Image (cartoon, helix red, strand yellow):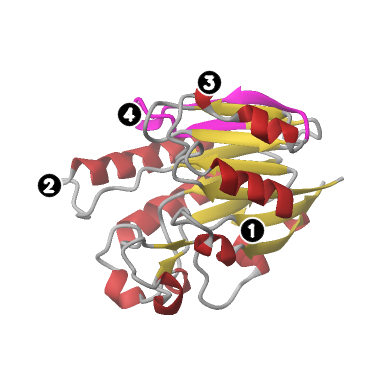
Amino acid sequence: MTFSLATWNINSVRLREPLVARLMTDEAPDVLCLQECKSPVDKIPLGTFQSLGYTHMVARGQKGYNGVAIFSKLPITEVAAHDFADLGHARHVAGRLENGVTIHNFYVPAGGDVPDRDVNDKFGQKLDYLTEMRDYFRSEKPKKSILVGDLNIAPREDDVWDHKKLLKIVSHTPIEVDHLAAVQEAADMVDVTRADIPEGLLYSWWSYRAADWDSADKGRRLDHIWATSDIAGAGHGSRVLRDARGWEQPSDHAPVFASFDL
C-alpha cells in the first residue's frame, strides 16, 4: 500500500479553511497533519474537509492558539495525546492507520525571542518540551512510526538562509539542535525529507516581516517528516510546496510532503 502524507502549520484552520480545501483538492494527500489550528476541536470545519474525502480526524485543540489535527482519507484511530512539559497546550496527537503505522503530529513551542532560559521562560519551556519528548521515546520505543510537524528548529546549516547569522537566533541555536537530535536518536528516526533531498538549501517557513518573502528567500526548514528506521526506507517523493506560501492570506509555513510504500 502506498499512501501520501503532508504536514503544514496552517496558522488558524478556520481563517485558512479555503487554503486547506485547496490543498486537499489540488494535492490530495491521503493524510494531512496540521499544526497551530487555533481552534477547539468542535469548531474545526470538518464538514468541508469530509466533503473532500477526509472522513477521519484525530485532533487536540484549544481556543485561539496551538492545536494539532490529523485529517485522513484512510481510517485512523487515536492512540496518544501527550502534554509534554505540562504546559496545558494542545501540541501533540497520534493516530494509527489500519496498516499499523502510527503517525505522531507535533507542534513544538517556538521558544520566544531570546535563547536564554534564565531570562526567557518560553525558551526554557521549549527545551523542557524536547527533553520530555526524548524521554518519552526512550521509554516507549516507537516502531513503524512517522513523526511530523512544526518542530520549530532548523537543524542543518543548509536549513537556514545564513548559518552564521542565525546561530544565536531561536530555532537554529546549537542547544536547540542538540535537543532535537536527542529526540531523533531516542526515537530511532530518520529525517525522510533530507534522506530524499540530501543537499542544498531547503526551507518551509518564511517570515511575514519580509516585504517580498520570495525574492528575499530568508527561510528556515522548521517543518519535518521523520520515520522510524524500520520503515524509513519506504519513504520517498519528499518535497516542499513552496507556492503555497504565496497563496492569498497564506500561512507563513509551506506544506511538506512524503509518500510511503507500506
Would you say the residues marked 1 and 3 are in contact, meaning their CB atoms lie under 8 Å apart?
A: no
Q: Which residue is mark 2?
A: 119
Instruction: Name the amino acid type tagged 4.
Output: Leu
Quick one: label 2, few (<14), some, or many (20+) residues within 10 Å?
Answer: few
- Quarter holding the N terminus is top right
Tag nearer the camera, 4 or 3: 3
Q: Position of residue 80 (x, y in %)?
A: 57, 25
Q: Which residue is mark 4?
A: 87
Q: Nearer the viewer, residue 185 or 164?
A: 164
Tag nearer the camera, 1 or 3: 3
- Name the residue at 55% across, 49% down: 8
Q: Position of residue 172 (x, y in %)?
A: 35, 62
- In the visual, does 239 lie left or right of 206? right
Disc 2, SS: loop
- Name the residue at 64% across, 44% down: 21
- Disc 4 or 1, which lies upstream in sequence? 4
Instruction: Name the amino acid type tagged 2.
Output: Val
Q: CA distance from mark 4 to mark 2?
A: 18 Å
Q: CA distance from mark 4 to mark 1?
A: 29 Å
Q: Which residue is mark 3?
A: 42
**Do we see residue 252 in this rendering?**
yes
- Disc 3 or 2, which lies upstream in sequence? 3
Instruction: Name the amino acid type tagged 3.
Output: Asp
Q: Position of residue 215 (x, y in %)?
A: 43, 79
Q: Which residue is mark 1?
A: 192
Q: CA distance from mark 1 to mark 3?
A: 33 Å
